[in-house]
Image (spheres, rainbow, N blue to C red):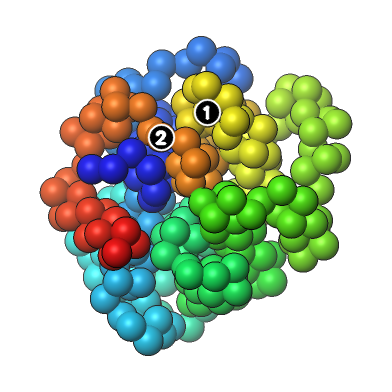
Amino acid sequence: MQNKGIIGAVCGDIIGSAYEFHKTKDMGFKLFTPRSKFTDDTVMTCAVAEWLVEDSTHSHEQLVKIMHRYGEEYPHAGYGGMFRRWLENKWTEPYNSFGNGSAMRVSPCGYYAKSFEEALQLAQISAEVTHSHPEGIIGAQAVAAMIYLLRSGEYSEKGKAFLKNHCFYDLDKISENWETIQRDYDFDVTCQGSVPEAIYCAMKNVSSPMGYERTVREAVSLGGDADTQGAIAGGIAAAVCEVPDDILNECLDRLEPPLVDVIERFNDVCNQ
């Protein structure tokens, strides 16, 4: 298993899972506890990855079918209320959500895309099958865009400008108020209330020696939707930072073989 790519989102999810309902503000939290496990973030990330490699048309219809199948195979992964009903009732229409579920599963789009425009297009499709609210789509596009720009070496000012002008996420403003944000941040499952902070955790740490681990630690210790913010931030950081071997191995031990197989197939396609 390679140490970069969507495994970064999966490991962020697993690390954050123990703190979703036991929030922490301590950067020194234990990375793994008996509660550490993969959640819906990992399951739906793998669903999007399978869709990208198996459906050459990248249609909404095929993604819906794949997501429904994953929901059947992993019914107890911790889905949110509306998404769980969407799965259980086999709904095929979106429900106008602006929750961060669109952003937690989108990292494969940023790794698969061959251009910035394709990253945005795939992210939009991956979001709007359920999260058709503009904020739900923007949250997904922001994450996919950062991944694409980082792995292609094009982030620089282009990324900040895109976040500010298209997504209305101002990383400079977040930076100026980071200490206050860290102190006062609380549980928020909206894209607009959780995705900018997760992106910032990644962007401020990707150049540091412990870039991946520090990114996930900061995202989780915000004390919010820990598994999802860990998945978002970890997925972005792993565009340039390797997931440390000890973290990777701990997480692989907690994954079921079919999920590992999907990640490896996705990696093979992206590396061709």
Amino acid carrying label 1: it is: Gly
Q: Is residue 125 left or right of residue 155?
A: left
| Residue at disc 1, secondary structure | helix
Residue 228 horizontal/vertical position (percent) = 50, 44
Q: Nearer the viewer, residue 188 or 211?
A: 211
Q: Which residue is label 1 attached to?
A: 211
Q: Residue at horizontal 31%, vertical 80%?
A: 55
Looking at the image, residue 150 lies above or below residue 70: above
Q: Which residue is label 2 attached to?
A: 242
Where residue 248 sits, quadrant-wise, is top left
Amino acid carrying label 2: it is: Glu
Looking at the image, residue 214 lies above or below residue 30: below
Residue 44 horizontal/vertical position (percent) = 37, 59
Where residue 52 sits, quadrant-wise, is bottom left
Q: Residue at horizontal 47%, vertical 68%?
A: 113
Looking at the image, residue 65 lies above or below residue 38: below
Looking at the image, residue 90 lies above or below residue 41: below
Mark 2 vs 1, N-terminal side: 1
| Residue at disc 2, secondary structure | loop
Circle 1 Cα neighbour tier, 10 Å, few/some/many (<14 / 14–19 / ≥20)? many
